[in-house]
């Protein structure tokens, strides 16, 4: 019997709640994970996962679903797994096409199978973000949240996990004021409805957004208010609040302070390390010049030309996270042809600091190994002098954790 193995998307919603099904009922078991790098503290609230499809080759299983011979759950599982394989190989457009066809087949089944349909939208959002189509990304996130809110109870864990997805979307689109308004609205509504966990999650993201915008006094004041809430005494939120406060304190990258933080925020054996500090990603000269001009309300210094067309550029980087929280041996594993920017990524990873854990590297404990996909930033625009919308280069990178988990499957 052949077995195809693939990873589910590491995105914001806890997909364990989206597609969980006992193994006795289906030849596919699914566990889930989340973990947006920007808010690594929320890894505390999530867990790793795999998807395994047994009995048939993945391509053949997905082809049956494309012919309408599968349940919505099975269609989502097989299509997302196959789309992830294509994504890993750099075939972003093929992955998007697979997911788009699956969404078209299943969107009218949202009422009876909201979790699988929402998972398809989430996978589409992930691929679209890396591929650079921000319109598709925005629509997919909106449909994902709408599907869960409309067809699951408000207290359902999947709905709770999705409460901040819209705010996360605005951050990815670099609309920070709208992200703040979205998080604040979610927090106020959740407090009014007695949903303290959802309110705390939105509040934490408001704090981190304020800190990222260098509003340390405001961020610490919000943290003080959050720590006075009864739910702050729960272990998951108590640790998250501590991480955020200490990360704000070491936002200037002071090595001594980071070392102290790495020791105070201990990481349990076998759990994913928590990113405590990292320098900003490098920006090319044209993107930096345009960003500087926009900060003063000016037009772009280097405008997009009608002849500009950006290809998809990506690399996979592997590196060790040592027991003391430092990184080591970052190396380029594979990628697209244009990789002149890859050395800057390796330098950024070399300066990261993660939470420390029990273990002694001198005694042979190497730490944990991680593989991350970096896609160079791009977006779709219609340049001056053209009527054709196309992908053009933008600043920054999209990052996705591709690490295979050693965590046993849920039963």
Image (cartoon, rainbow, N blue to C red):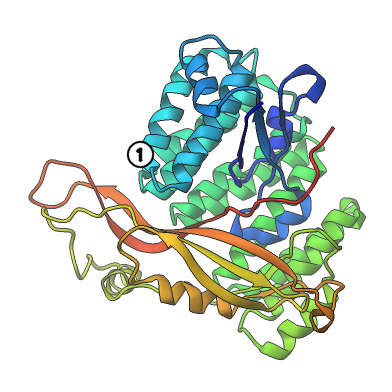
Residue 278, by quadrant, is: bottom right
Task: Please tell me whether residue 155 is drawn above or below residue 177 in the rendered image.
Answer: above
Give the image location of residue 151, x and y in percent: 66, 20
Could you tell whether 335 is left or right of 194 in the image?
A: left
**Residue 291 image point, x, y percent:** 33, 69
Residue in front for this viewpoint, 76 or 160: 76
In this rendering, the answer to whether 75 lies above or below 194 is above
Kindly tell me whether residue 149 is visible in this rendering.
no
Q: Which residue is rendered at x = 52% and y = 72% of the image?
A: 331
Q: Quadrant of the N terminus?
A: top right
Instruction: Choose between 199 and 79: the one closer to the eye.
Output: 79
Residue 224 lies, in percent from the top left, at: 80, 66
Q: To which residue does mark 1 refer? A: 93
Q: Relative to 205, is 94 on the left or the right? A: left
**Residue drawn at the location 79% of the way across and 84% of the way down:** 260
Q: Quadrant of the C terminus?
A: top right
Q: How many marks?
A: 1
Q: Neighbour class for label 1 at 10 Å: few (<14), some, many (≥20)? A: some
Q: Position of residue 387 (x, y in %)?
A: 12, 41
- Please tell me whether residue 156 is drawn above or below residue 402 in the rendered image: above
């Amino acid at each position: 019997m052949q077995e195809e193995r693939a990873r589910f998307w590491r995105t914001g919603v806890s997909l364990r709640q989206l597609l969980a099904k006992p193994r006795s009922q289906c030849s596919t078991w699914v566990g889930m994970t989340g973990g947006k790098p920007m808010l690594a503290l929320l890894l505390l609230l999530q867990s790793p996962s795999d998807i395994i499809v047994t009995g048939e080759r993945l391509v053949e299983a997905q082809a049956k679903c494309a012919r309408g011979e599968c349940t919505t759950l099975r269609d989502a599982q097989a299509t997302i797994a196959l789309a992830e394989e294509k994504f890993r190989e750099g075939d972003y457009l093929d992955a998007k096409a697979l997911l788009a066809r699956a969404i078209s087949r299943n969107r009218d089944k949202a009422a009876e199978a909201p979790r699988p349909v929402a998972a398809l939208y989430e996978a589409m959002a992930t691929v679209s973000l890396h591929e650079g189509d921000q319109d598709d990304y925005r629509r997919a996130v909106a449909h994902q949240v709408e599907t869960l809110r409309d067809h699951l109870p408000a207290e359902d864990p999947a709905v709770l996990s999705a409460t901040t997805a819209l705010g996360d979307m605005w951050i990815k689109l670099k609309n920070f004021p709208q992200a703040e308004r979205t998080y604040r609205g979610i927090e106020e509504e959740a407090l009014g409805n007695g949903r303290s966990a959802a309110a705390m999650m939105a509040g934490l993201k408001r704090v981190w957004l304020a800190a990222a915008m260098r509003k340390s006094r405001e961020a610490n004041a919000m943290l003080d208010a959050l720590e006075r809430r009864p739910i702050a005494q729960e272990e998951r939120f108590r640790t998250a609040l501590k991480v955020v406060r200490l990360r704000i304190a070491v936002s200037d990258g002071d090595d001594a302070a980071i070392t102290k933080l790495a020791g105070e925020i201990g990481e349990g054996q076998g759990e994913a390390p928590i990113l405590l500090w990292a320098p900003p990603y490098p920006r090319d000269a044209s993107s930096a010049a345009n960003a500087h001009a926009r900060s003063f309300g000016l037009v772009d210094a280097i405008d997009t030309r009608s002849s500009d067309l950006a290809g998809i550029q990506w690399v996979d980087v592997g590196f060790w996270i040592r027991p003391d929280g430092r990184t080591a041996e970052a190396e380029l594993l594979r990628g697209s042809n244009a990789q002149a920017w890859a050395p800057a990524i390796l330098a950024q990873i070399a300066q990261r600091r993660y939470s420390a854990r029990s273990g002694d590297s001198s005694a042979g404990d190497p730490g944990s190994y991680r593989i991350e996909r970096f896609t160079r930033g791009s977006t779709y625009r219609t340049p001056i002098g053209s009527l054709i919308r196309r992908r053009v280069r933008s600043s920054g990178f999209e990052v996705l954790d591709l690490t295979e988990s050693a965590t046993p499957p849920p039963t």
